[in-house]
Amino acid sequence: GELRLGGVITADGQVGALAEGLRLGAAHTLQLEVSRPFSLSKEEWDTVALERLLEASNDTPGGGRAELAAVLLQPGLANVCLISHGMSVVKARVESHLPRRGNAAMATAAAKATDKWRAQVLAALLQHTDLDALKALVVAGPGFAKDDFVRWATEEAARRGGEEGKKLARSLPKWLAVHASSAHKHALREVLADPAIAARVADTKAAGEVAALAEFLTLLTRDPDRVAYGYRHVLAATEQGAVHRLLLSDNLFRARSLLRRRQA
């Protein structure tokens, strides 16, 4: 499935059960929309799946327990993400065609389009986060787009005034502008692995997961005999009480086979 701006998930696949108007085995596309009821079923629900479902479906600002938010952006594209214990969720994707700068008239049009896009990004950020509750807000991307957005948001807080402007202004000391290779979600990993960022968000759960993975990779390089990986080797270490820290991959939690997921 793919999450698009507007809260619509498009899923496609084959019909696996008899349903009115649908032929068994036929290809079918389904759209799930905000406020449109649907049923979600599994053979067995584990605590991790239930926790993720609860967190992802929490529509309160900030997603309930999210301590860290990130805005990944490059000119014309922004992803607003919430990062909490166990997962990161793209809450909004904001895209806009920004005209190129040329003569004075083209430059004016480009500046207006850019400001409009920035306003849309900020609106998505305010809609999906509680700025007062966040411990840090990472603004990341290639080039100068991230710095320009932070500077624009600072000026916007002064322009708006009122409670919304004050709330935005209070949050600005928690904003961290850092480099990322792109504005896509996969860039989050490199951003959170940055030592400077890790130090600022050290008291968030998300940073704890990144630190644990970094510790594993460092130990694997320096003292590989103290590291076990792969199901059988980890199981043997667990049975001998030799596990100091256990890391479980999403590939195991999200495996299609219920038997494989139960191994966790």
Image (cartoon, rainbow, N blue to C red):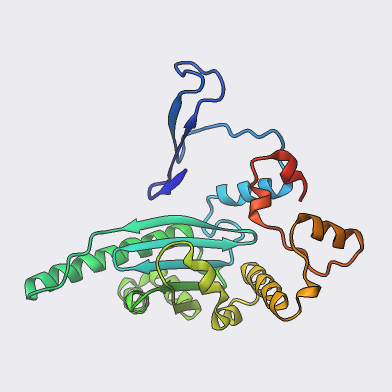
Left or right, 96 with respect to 64, comes to left
Left or right, 188 with respect to 143, comes to right
Q: Is residue 41 above or below residue 123?
A: above
Closer-to-camera residue (63/202): 202
Closer-to-camera residue (132/224): 224
Which residue corresponds to the image point at 44% horizontal and 48% vertical from the top-left?
A: 3
Closer-to-camera residue (215/85): 215
Which residue corresponds to the image point at 47% horizontal and 61% vertical from the top-left?
A: 185
Which residue corresponds to the image point at 88% horizontal and 67% vertical from the top-left?
A: 242
Q: Is residue 196 above or below residue 19?
A: below
Q: Is residue 115 above or below residue 222?
A: above
Q: Position of residue 42 (x, y in %)?
A: 66, 35
Q: Is residue 110 visible?
A: yes
Q: Is residue 136 visible?
A: no
Q: Residue furthest front?
A: 225
Q: Is residue 22 above or below residue 34?
A: above
Total numbered labels: 0
Q: Residue furthest right?
A: 240
Which residue corresponds to the image point at 44% horizontal and 16% vertical from the top-left?
A: 21
In the rendered image, which quarter is residue 164 located in? Answer: bottom left
Left or right, 162 with respect to 85, comes to left
Q: Position of residue 132 (x, y in %)?
A: 53, 69
In the rendered image, which quarter is residue 110 located in? Answer: bottom left
